[in-house]
């Protein structure tokens, strides 16, 4: 870790092998904190409610590790999978999805959280609120099979999204 300069700190990682991470830069979790005097006030211990805002993503709240595998359409309703399955929501050294690892880290860092508000992104077909339809959508549809990929919102399944 380098010395902070003007309120900014940075980390330099040299010769880091990406082979264990599907040749992608993994998610790094860094903790910056100050030492408190014994018996001092702790912000982390006094937080009771928190919002989780992951942005959009089909599996951002997925509790299971999801994988995608390329597939080729051979008829109107048949596909042939090929290649290696790639993890969608797991790029760490635990056996947990991003969401489950994040919740564990939340519990560790903010031990007294009692309530979590979850932000969910939906899609629309029109910018005019009067005429728009809201719906769930998928990122990988025809070119990839998703495993296990089993979700449903109301009566809309992943295949129908």
Image (cartoon, rainbow, N blue to C red):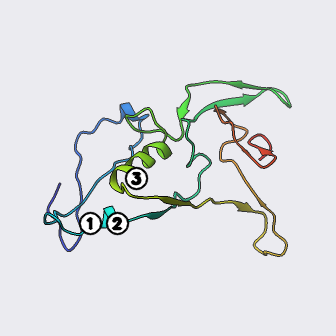
Residue at the (66%, 42%) spot, across then down: 140
Q: CA distance from mark 1 to mark 3?
A: 15 Å
> Which quadrant holds residue 101?
top left
**Which label belongs to residue 42?**
1
**Which label belongs to residue 46?**
2
Q: In the rendering, at what x and y percent does residue 148 appear?
A: 64, 31
Number of other residues with Cα within 10 Å of mark 2, as a class: few under 14, some 14 to 19, many 20 or more:
few
**Residues tagged 1 and 2 counted as in contact (Cβ below 8 A):** yes
Q: In the rendering, at what x and y percent does residue 149 appear?
A: 66, 36
Residue at the (17%, 54%) spot, across then down: 1
In the rendered structure, the answer to whether residue 145 lies left or right of residue 44 reads right
Q: Earlier in the sequence, mark 3 or mark 2?
A: 2
* Nearer the camera: disc 3 or disc 2: 2
SS category of the residue bearing label 3:
helix
**Residues tagged 1 and 3 counted as in contact (Cβ below 8 A):** no
**Which label belongs to residue 106?**
3
Q: CA distance from mark 1 to mark 2?
A: 7 Å
Residues 156 and 141: in front is 156
* Residue 109 versus residue 130 in the image, above or below: above
In the rendered structure, the answer to whether residue 156 lies left or right of residue 42 reads right
In the rendered structure, the answer to whether residue 149 lies left or right of residue 20 reads right
Number of other residues with Cα within 10 Å of mark 1, as a class: few under 14, some 14 to 19, many 20 or more:
few
Residue at the (55%, 59%) spot, across then down: 55
> Which quadrant holds residue 79?
top right
Residue at the (71%, 60%) spot, across then down: 123
In the rendered structure, the answer to whether residue 81 lies left or right of residue 94 reads right
Residues 129 and 24: in front is 129
**Which label belongs to residue 3?**
none
């Amino acid at each position: 870790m380098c010395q902070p300069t003007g309120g900014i700190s940075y980390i330099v990682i040299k010769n880091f092998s990406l082979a264990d991470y599907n040749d992608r830069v993994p998610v790094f979790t860094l903790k910056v904190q100050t030492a408190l005097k014994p018996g001092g006030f702790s912000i982390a211990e006094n937080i009771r409610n928190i919002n989780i805002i992951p942005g959009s993503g089909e599996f951002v709240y997925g509790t299971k590790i999801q994988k995608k595998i390329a597939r080729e359409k051979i008829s109107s309703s048949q596909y042939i999978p090929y290649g290696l399955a790639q993890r969608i929501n797991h790029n760490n050294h635990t056996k947990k999805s991003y969401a489950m690892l994040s919740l564990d880290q939340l519990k560790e860092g903010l031990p007294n959280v009692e309530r979590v508000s979850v932000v969910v992104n939906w899609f629309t077909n029109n910018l005019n609120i009067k005429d728009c339809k809201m719906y769930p959508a998928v990122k990988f549809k025809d070119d990839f099979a998703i495993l296990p990929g089993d979700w449903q919102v109301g009566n809309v399944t992943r295949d129908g999204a």
